[in-house]
Image (cartoon, rainbow, N blue to C red):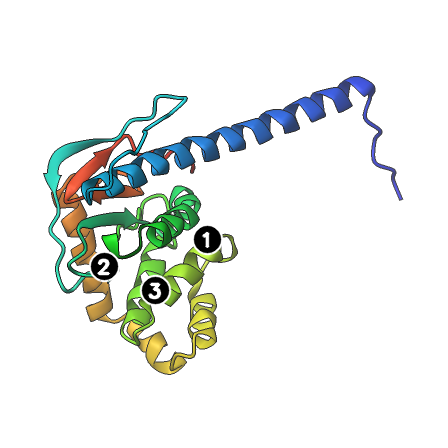
Amino acid sequence: MDEEPRLTKRQRRELRKQEKLQQADSSQKRKHVAIWLSVALALVLVAVGIVGIVLASRNNTTVQTSSDTVTVTDGDWSVGPKDAKVTLVEYSDFQCPACGFYYPLLKKLKQESGDTLRFVYRNYPLRQIHKNAQLAAQAAEAAGLHNKFWEMHDTLFEHQDAWSNLGNPTDVFVSYAKDLGLDTAKFTADLTSSAVQQAVSEDVASGDAVTVDATPTLFLQGKKVENTPSNYD
């Protein structure tokens, strides 16, 4: 059996240098998003009348809103009171690495905001670059027909690496449905049904109407939030 070539001291130093650079880059990305979400949370708290919030950002991250607006309907997937004083809408792609990165941070934001925040999720699969995003969105919508949308939403993000690069993730999505206690035969039929595909298409059309061009895209109080970090593909 051939032995692996031994690295020289110089090569080992270079390898350690590259590892440190990668770790620093990942840390910086997390810090950037965490700061941005801290600002977003502060805006939510200010919007409901809680004063004394200090917005501090070492890298000058800012949150601005555009004139594009969205209106939430009873047909949207949402958590939080319908009469919450603040509404946050996310256009997202289950296969998008940036959306997967945001998932736990937005989950924490929802938890910390309590009843002051209504969070709405809308599908916006980037079909041209994420080959399984459309079917993943359909999996969530199909689970929603069984009252398990949010459970499938969480499962898809938490296991994003397991299905993103599969040639056909159908069997994996069906296994998730089974784990969630769904009727797998009905789920499988719903997965590619015209009703489910139409639901995803309507979300995409609504995103196109308000100039969504990347994921995740957020709307706070109906206004598009600009400068959302999303370059994590």
- Left/right placement of residue 19 relative to residue 229 reads right
Q: Residue at x 23, y 49 (%)?
A: 89
Identify the residue position indicated by label 2 in the image: 200
Instruction: Please provide percent x and percent y for residue 66.
Output: 15, 33
Q: Residue at x 40, y 50 (%)?
A: 108
Marks 2/3 in contact by CB < 8 Å: the verdict is: no
- State which tag comes first along the sequence, 1 or 3: 3
Quarter location, residue 157: bottom left
Q: Residue at x 35, y 33 (%)?
A: 36
Q: What amino acid does circle 3 point to?
A: Trp
Identify the residue position indicated by label 1 in the image: 164
- State which tag comes first along the sequence, 2 or 3: 3
Task: State the residue in front, 77 or 113.
Answer: 113
Q: What amino acid does circle 1 point to?
A: Ser
Circle 2 packing at 10 Å, graded few (<14), some (14-19), many (20+), is: many
Marks 1/3 in contact by CB < 8 Å: the verdict is: no
